[in-house]
Structures are given as C-alpha cells and as structure tokens.
Amino acid sequence: MRDPSPWTLDTIPDQSGRLAVVTGANSGIGFITARELARRGAHVVLACRDPERGRAAVTRLRSEVPAARLELRRVDLSSLASIREFAARWDHDRLDLLVNNAGIAMVPFARTRDGFESQFGVNHLGTFALTGLLLPALLAAPDPRVVTVSSEGQRFARFDLGNLNAERSYRTAFAYVQSKRANLYFAVELQRRADAAGVRLGSMAVAPGLTRTNVLTGGANGSRGALYAKAVDLLVRAAFRPAPEGAKTSLYAATVPDLPGGSFVVPDGPFQLRGEPVLRPRDRALHDLHTPARLWRLSEQLTGVTYALPASPPPAAAPDDAAGRTPCRPS
Ligand SMILES: NC(=O)c1ccc[n+]([C@@H]2O[C@H](COP(=O)([O-])OP(=O)(O)OC[C@H]3O[C@@H](n4cnc5c(N)ncnc54)[C@H](OP(=O)(O)O)[C@@H]3O)[C@@H](O)[C@H]2O)c1
C-alpha cells in the first residue's frame, strides 16, 4: 500500500553534522545523491575515479548548491591498490554514511588491474573491499549507515559462484545482473554480521529503476560504435527517467531515520522500473542464508580484505551452489 504522504526529495531531513562518502559521485545517480545530501547540510566526499570529471562535478554541484561542503577524493574501484590508498588516506575521525553507488553495466569483456572480470571486480569486489577498509571509520560514527546500489535487474541473475569471474563464459548482461545480485547479497550479509557482532550499523540495498545516466554509454561502452549508441539513445529516451528519480531510492535509504537495517528499497511501480521508494522485504535474495555467506568468504579471499566482524551463526549445511562448481579465482 502506498504511503498516504509520498516521500519526495523535499522530505529529506536536515543532514548537518553527517559525513558521507558517495562513490561515482561525478555522474548520474551518484551526482544527484551527493547534491541532495549536500543541499541538506551533509559534508560530502565525492569519491571519483577520474580527477577531471570529479572536478567538473564539484564545480557543477557548487553552482547548484553554493553552500555545499564538499571534498573530492580519488578512488578507482577496479584497482585494489587505489581502494587501499583511499582508505589509508582517510583522515576524518569517523564516517557516518557510505553510499556504494559507482558501477559499470553491460560492458565488453575486460579484466580489472587485479585480474577480475570487470563488472564483478568493480561492482562487487571493489565495493566489498572499500566498505571493509572503511569499516573502522564507520564504526567510529554513532549511527553509521551503508547504502549499496544494486539493480532491479538482479532478479534475473542466475547466480553462479563458479562463474563469477567469467571462468567458463562471459555474457555481458548476465555478468551485470549477477554483480548486482552480489551487491544485494553483500548488503544483507553485512547487516547479518553487524547484528551478530552487536555493532550499530545499518546496511541497506537499493534498486534505482530505469534511469537516464551515462551507465550504458560512458566508460568502456563508449567504444561500442555508432549503431549501439543510437539504439541505446532511443531506448533511454523512451523508457528511462531523469537521474533525480533514480536517486530517490538511494536518498531514501540514506536518510530516512530509523530505517530497519537490511532494508531493500526499490521503486514501487511495475517491475521496479519506476515509482516512489518502497521497502521490498519479500525479495527471495534477502532470505538466502547460504549464498551471501559463501560470497562473503570468497570476496575476502579474492580481495585480501577481511572485516572485523564475525560471521553470523553458520546456517545448516549449505548445499553446494546451483552448478556445484568451485568458486572462482582471479586469473
Ligand atoms: N541507470 C540505471 O538505469 C540503473 C539501473 C539499475 C542500477 N543502476 C546502478 O546505479 C549506479 C550508478 O550508475 P548510473 O546509472 O548513475 O551511471 P553513471 O552515470 O555511469 O555513473 C556511474 C558512476 O560510477 C563511476 N565508476 C565507474 N567505474 C568506476 C571505477 N572503476 N571506480 C570508481 N568509480 C567508477 C563512474 O565514473 P566515470 O564517470 O569516471 O565513468 C560514474 O561516476 C550503478 O551502480 C548502476 O549499476 C543504474
């Protein structure tokens, strides 16, 4: 049932005193998320991979919100060294909010600097490593929150722990939705572990719905040729909403007071493609106890980042993953 007083960007309460990091804040959903947090008084760190695009975003954001308290810092989620450097340089006494927004979608096959398939490497492993390395700063905050941007497309993932890293095959759309399911599993497992450890930390996942951004045309998708660009342009114009609509679920998850940890926030319209933010507690992925725990252990092995959070009580004997295959290794 719809809330009688719908949540809008104007509903966001005062964020003064809150220190936030938004990854991929130079573009699309991340830019709007950073802008609206700053408009409400948060101190926002724009964590961007490209300094020039980052500076352009800061200039644009300041022109729209002159009083914004901003910092630009560099992080490339396709490089564990860059992620470690970002965390090592963290010089604030805490971190109140981390919005894991940065991502790539449907890109041609490539590997990250550390040898991971790029969508799995950037979208999931980079996010996993960054959050783990920032965890001490998050736990130093009185009411820390982590928001991880998944996708409505995660529902179509055939999650295969034996092919996360394109060991057997690579199909770009499959790899994308699988990495977005990994984002959701990560968010729920982080909440489970925080709860098991008795630490105060809220971990939320969101799906933005179809949103007009650079995600299908920027970065590695920029070299796909004129026909691809034309087709995507037509699709995006016809079906995708403006970026402020897509940022609503992230901003809802980041700012609604007392939101239950482990919430999955999606648009309330058909197929979660558009609409107003609503909780989706019945998503099957949220109730899977085994796969998120296995993904977590694998992510720790692959990234070398271990969290200072104990595992939640082990679920009953886990059936092997659907395909019964050995989890991946970086190549
Ligand atoms: N748009 C949609 O319809 C939609 C639907 C479902 C989910 N999402 C999710 O929404 C999130 C935001 O995407 P968007 O739609 O706003 O697309 P976008 O405009 O392309 O923004 C993506 C951001 O991520 C950054 N990024 C990409 N690779 C990175 C890396 N290796 N290290 C650090 N930053 C990196 C990009 O930086 P550069 O500008 O330097 O490339 C950009 O700032 C993504 O996680 C995406 O999967 C989007």
Image (spheres, helix red, strand yellow):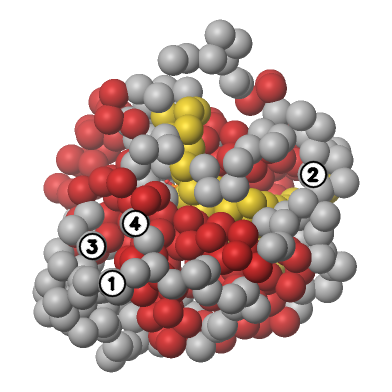
Residue at image coords 68%, 56%: 201
Q: CA distance from mark 3 to mark 2?
A: 37 Å
Mark in the foreground, 3 or 2: 3
Q: Which residue is mark 4?
A: 288
Q: Amino acid at mark 2?
A: Ala
Asked whether disc 2 touches disc 1, contact meaning CB atoms under 8 Å apart, the reply is no
Mark on residue 318?
1
In this view, the residue in front, 110 or 171, is: 171
Q: Which residue is mark 3?
A: 159
Sequence-wise, the earlier of marks 1 and 3 is 3
User: Looking at mark 2, is its residue's CB closer than 8 Å to ligand 1?
Assistant: no
**Left or right: 65 as drawn, with respect to 53:** right
Tag 2's secondary structure? loop
Mark in the foreground, 1 or 3: 1
Q: CA distance from mark 4 to mark 1?
A: 11 Å
Tag 4's secondary structure? loop
In this view, the residue in front, 87 or 235, is: 87
